[in-house]
Image (cartoon, rainbow, N blue to C red):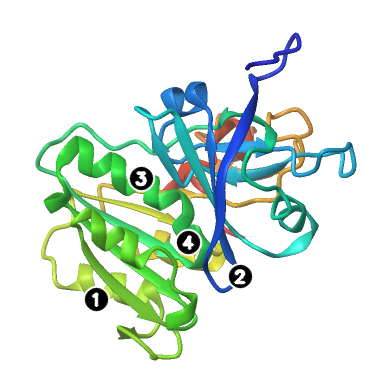
Amino acid sequence: MPNTPCGMKSIYDCKLIEQHEVSPGVWLSKLTGPEIARGAVAGQFVNVQVAKTTDPLLRRPFSLHAVDREKGTFSLLYVLVGRGTALLHRYVSGDIISVVGPLGNGFDLGDSPDAEHIVVAGGCGAAPLHFLCDSLCEKWGCEKVTVLVGGKSKDALLCEDEFREHGVLTEAATDDASYGYGGFVTQLLQAHLDKRSDASNLRIYSCGPHGMMREVARICSEHEVQSCQVSLENKMACGIGVCTGCIQKIKKQSQGCDPAWEYKRVCADGPVFEAENIIWE
């Protein structure tokens, strides 16, 4: 049931259906939340109260990994690291968890049926891109989608099997060359684009480490890709745009003596941005 104090985003009491380890140190939580499932778009996130007490006081942000609108459920995928995820991990099936969401702005899937789509996932950045892949397949057909998933090693690859189950072309890259393409997933992207004479009808989406997304942005700019969107993972506190703790420098049209950039809140104005607009530092 929603519990919405004045001026706040919608807060829902969501029941935990199941929670299990999908790979070493990586956990999947599935919860009921019809309102969240109905309203969510790929790229958005939720803010979760990870403990039954007020310690810690702040909620933790988690990307929406999967959504089943018909069943009214959504899933979170997270790496068990730090106090917040350790506390979330203690919940058991049937527990009620307070969740705020859906929050933020999602990916723009475009309006051209002729466009091709490449999804570039790095490490735990694969979490929101699973939901994106669902959405792209639903709107444009899986034959229009390619997924490039990267990790430090084969064991560190996330969601590869899930992407393949969508029926999309999926390729893996490992930094240590233990599986798939030997090298960074950005190098695999570079190889894909180098084969193309024209990338003007190509849309690219990415989430992962900051340095990886910066390189994705550079490659897309070099090849004049139509659209390159990235989901930033700046550290958030409030998650609703009040504290400005997750600000990011974004380019803007300079007017007179005004600076050529401005701060945007990743939680409220993002987390998805056009890569060409980000000032990468």
Q: Is residue 87 left or right of residue 17?
A: right
**Image quarter for residue 10?**
top right
| Mark 1: secondary structure | helix
Q: Position of residue 186 (x, y in %)?
A: 38, 72
Reading the image, the residue beneath label 1 is 191
- Residue at the spot x=50%, y=34% of the render? 253
99 vs 182, left or right, is right
Which label belongs to residue 132?
A: 3
As shown in the figure, which amino acid type bears the numbered disc 3? Leu
Q: Tell me which numbered mark, 1 or 3, is placed earlier along the sequence.
A: 3
- Kindly identify the residue that appears in the image at 53 percent across and 28 percent down: 33
Q: Dot 2: what SS?
A: loop
Q: CA distance from mark 1 to mark 3?
A: 23 Å
The CA distance from mark 4 to mark 2 is 23 Å
Q: Mark 4: which secondary structure?
A: helix
Q: Answer left or right for 280 relative to 60.
A: left
| Camera-nearest residue between 157 and 28 | 28
Q: Quick one: label 4 or label 2, which is nearer the N terminus? A: 2
Q: Which residue is mark 2?
A: 25
Q: Which residue is mark 4?
A: 213
| Whole-number angstrom distance, CA of label 2 to CA of label 1 | 31 Å
Question: Which amino acid does the dot numbered 4 rest on?
Answer: Met
* 100 vs 141: above or below: above
